[in-house]
Amino acid sequence: MAKSNILFIINPISGGKDKLKIPAIIDANLDRTKFNPNYSFTEYVGHAAEIAEEAANKNFDIIVAVGGDGTINEIAAKVMQQQKILGIIPFGSGNGLARFLKIPMDTAKSIQVLNGLNVTKIDTGTFNEKFFFNMAGMGFDAHISSVFVGNKKRGLSGYLKLGLKEMLNYKPQTYHLLIDGVHYTREAFVVSVANSSQYGNNAHVSPHASVTDGLLDICIIKAFPLYKIPLLAWYMMSATTDKSDMVEIIKGKNINITRVDDGAIHIDGEPYFMGREIAVSIVPLSLNIIVPESNMLVPLT
């Protein structure tokens, strides 16, 4: 059997974790009867996409993102466009897509998932024609992403501390949504468009989301008093936000969102600036990805 050429694109700063030893761990666990491995480290924002595009145009069959959701986003967009196969070794702050797909957080075990070569297809979304694979949105989470990008203390603890500080001054905004032809107007703290169920760190905003149902979940976190923050956190961590009166979830394929002003949005956790109007859509079963053999990609129940 011919070996597959596999490229590991490693983001050295994602999640604030040292990854210089990653190639040695891969060499110790990768099935060399199946793969010819190569390695590349990113050096700046956008570099992962450049490396992935070059690799996809060459003879690499599988391109593996070693990093978090932002790194996956850069690489997956190029993998999808070239109809190659994506692999994931989770190394981010939240690892939302990897956790949803049940890819182990343990590096050696995630490499063993690659060895299994269980390839499936998942949906992807577009946010003003920019692809996302896990979650995109606007409101407080986008505001935090834009502030957090300049924060030197990455990781969950840094994110939580910054979030609590910023929450004291953040004001909910009015959004007009057109979801598959139906109009909604909502005052919201957050409007998230979910492909998978969670932001990361097992914080589930849409417990019944599926990456294979051809639908996106529009998750509206309503304005709420600050004393309810622990309750909202409990709903997220217990994957029961669909039972909370603080959260409204509407499924759809084609979504237009209009807000009062231009501002921050996030795409797979990475901050961007977009205008008042956002067009969102789903691209069904468009990304080839390696997942654990036990993962049937069904929503949480």
Image (cartoon, helix red, strand yellow):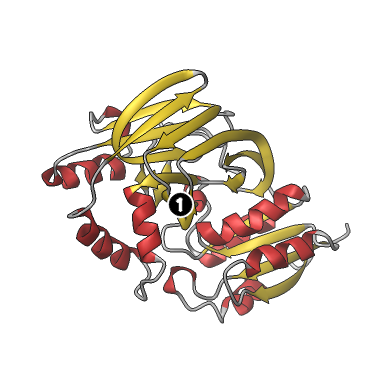
Q: Secondary structure at mark 1?
A: strand
Q: Position of residue 226 (x, y in %)?
A: 14, 46
Is residue 151 visible in the rendered image? The answer is yes
The C terminus - image quarter: top left
- In the rendered structure, the answer to whether residue 126 lies left or right of residue 6 reads left
- In the rendered structure, the answer to whether residue 51 lies left or right of residue 198 reads right
The N terminus - image quarter: bottom right
Identify which residue, 48 or 101, lies in the foreground: 48
Q: Position of residue 44 (x, y in %)?
A: 58, 74
Q: Position of residue 243 (x, y in %)?
A: 27, 28
Q: Examine the rendered structure and indicate whether residue 250 appears above or below residue 91.
A: above
Which residue ends up furthest to the left in the rendered image?
Answer: 227
Is residue 299 visible in the rendered image? The answer is no
Label 1 neighbour load within 10 Å: few <14, some 14-19, many 20+: many
Q: Residue at x 41, y 49 (%)?
A: 199
Q: Examine the rendered structure and indicate whether residue 97 appears above or below residue 223.
A: below
Q: Residue at x 79, y 57 (%)?
A: 61
Q: Which residue is mark 1?
A: 266
Q: Position of residue 262 (x, y in %)?
A: 42, 47
